[in-house]
Image (cartoon, grey):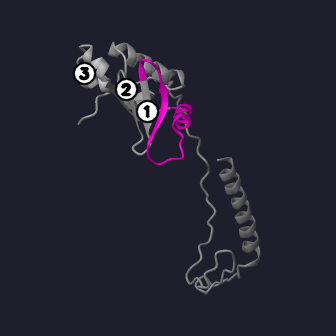
Amino acid sequence: MKSILIAGFALTAILAIACSETAEEGIQESTNPTEVVSVNGLFDTGIPFVGEMPTPVASSMEATPVPTIAPEPAPTPSALPPDTYSPTPEEIQVWERLTVDPREVGDKLLVETDHYKVNYRISNRQVSVLVKAPPFEESKTAAEEWFVSQGLSPQSLCVIVRINFVPSQEVMDSGYEFQAEDSVPTGCDVPNS
């Protein structure tokens, strides 16, 4: 990533130098606004420009001070409902760190314990959490706490990526009855099917 940024800055500097030299040397000035003007330079197409060249006009308006209004403090992330929460740049970086993978398809195992297994599905950018051990609620909470321990807030789990919780056969055999709200992180809206 750093090499791309450095290359971008270097290209920008080269273009700026080339354009400033071209601007000083390559424009033939004209006093007639409809005369053909030739611009030779970095982006010269060989096609002359015909038309009126705009002339700068000095503004007689003076700057008017704009009254400032003190903004209200933003609510803390934990006070925001999931549908209005935007992940912080740090949370996005955490998510990118967790899911970086050169492959375009397949699954990436993020973590596996005795209670849950978290897989990232690369091709559709979704997370599947297999809740392996009963009781479902405790294992689901443990998986959500793992995400938080990585640097994600509970609210970001609702918006940063789609996370699906799925009970294992062992959990289902323990008498657990699956509910739609159990398929998403705690506090998140259940998507319409």
In the drawing, what numbered circle is on residue 178?
3
Asked if residue 79 shows in the view, the reply is no
Pointer 1 or 3: first along the chain: 1
Closer to the camera, 51 or 79?
Answer: 79
Residue 38's x, y, as percent? Answer: 65, 84
**SS category of the residue bearing label 1:** strand
In the drawing, what numbered circle is on residue 130?
2
The kind of residue on which mark 1 rests is: Asn
On screen, residue 132 versus residue 38, left or right, reads left
Q: Which residue is mark 1?
A: 119
Instruction: Give the magenta-colored segment's residue range.
Output: 88-116
Closer to the camera, 144 or 26?
Answer: 144
Asked if residue 23 shows in the view, the reply is yes
- Whether the residues at callouts 1 and 2 have beta carbons within 8 Å, the answer is yes
Q: Quadrant of residue 125?
A: top left
Label 1 – label 3 distance at C-alpha: 20 Å
Image point 49% across, 21% down: which residue? 146
On screen, residue 47 versus residue 79, left or right, reads right
**SS category of the residue bearing label 2:** strand
The kind of residue on which mark 3 rests is: Phe
- Whether the residues at callouts 1 and 3 have beta carbons within 8 Å, the answer is no
Pointer 2 or 3: first along the chain: 2
